[in-house]
Each structure stands twice: as C-alpha cells, then as structure tokens.
Image (cartoon, rainbow, N blue to C red):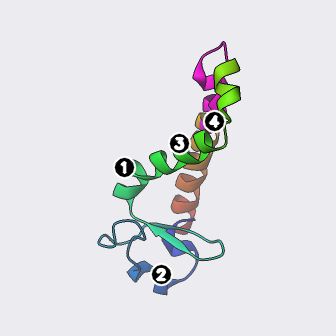
Amino acid sequence: MLINERCPEDSTETCSFCGENTAKALWMGKSDIFVCSHCAIEHLPQLMADAIVGSISIEQLQASTGPTCEINKELRIRERFHSAFSSALIRKIRTT
C-alpha cells in the first residue's frame, strides 16, 4: 500500500532495506516492511526471483523442456505487476 494510505505517522518511516531513504510504500504482515522507490526497483525483483526459484525443485528444472518463463510464471508476474501498478496510480490520484 502507498505510505499515506495507512496513517500520516508512517510518512517518516525509513526503508527497511537500505535504512536511509524515506519509505514510499509498506507491506503489512507479521511485521511491517517499508520500502523506498529505489529499493523497490533495485532489490525487490531479486527477492521475488529468489523466492520463486527457491520453490522450484531441481527435478522440475531438469525435466523442463520449455523456456524457464513457463516454470517461473513470468507471464503471471507481469500481469500482476501491471494490474498492481495501475491500481496504485488510481489510488494515488483519488487520495490527492
């Protein structure tokens, strides 16, 4: 969620990844994770890739005859990103 969607106090939080930049978004889970736009672009894609590849067994990789995008659901990831990006833009426009 965008940082200003939860409460004004969150606007002073720093990024959970770099610890330096002001957070622009947050993920609410067992503990809140704050992220700046730089780390969202530079570090979150690697985190996603590691989580996806980590769930694939070596047997699946060895048995695969198609492109890796069939294994890692690349199309679904792109669809979800574009949908989420559009949703975030709409929410930002509505709240300003």
Q: Helix or strand or loop: what does disc 4 sit on?
A: helix
- Using the numbered discs, state the Cα–Cα distance from disc 4 to disc 2 in whole angstroms: 29 Å
Q: Nearer the viewer, residue 58 or 25?
A: 58
Q: Which residue is mark 4?
A: 79
In the figure, 46 relative to 35: above or below? above
Q: Please tell me whether residue 13 belongs to the stretch shown in magenta.
A: no
For badge 1, the amino acid type reads Glu
Identify the residue at horizontal 47%, vertical 46% (top origin): 45
Q: Please tell me whether residue 65 belongs to the stretch shown in magenta.
A: yes
- Using the numbered discs, state the Cα–Cα distance from disc 3 to disc 2 in whole angstroms: 28 Å
Query: Given contact means CB atoms under 8 Å apart, are the residues at marks 1 and 4 in contact?
Result: no
Q: Helix or strand or loop: what does disc 3 sit on?
A: helix
Identify the residue at horizontal 61%, vertical 42% (top origin): 52
- The segment highlighted magenta reads 64-77
For badge 4, the amino acid type reads Glu
- Using the numbered discs, state the Cα–Cα distance from disc 3 to disc 4 in whole angstroms: 16 Å
Q: Which residue is mark 1?
A: 42
Q: Which residue is mark 2?
A: 10
Choose the circle earlier in sequence order: 3 or 2.
Answer: 2
Residue 31: x and y in percent read 60, 77
For badge 2, the amino acid type reads Asp
Q: Helix or strand or loop: what does disc 2 sit on?
A: helix
Q: Nearer the viewer, mark 3 or mark 2?
A: 3
Choose the circle earlier in sequence order: 1 or 4.
Answer: 1
Q: Quadrant of the N terminus?
A: bottom right
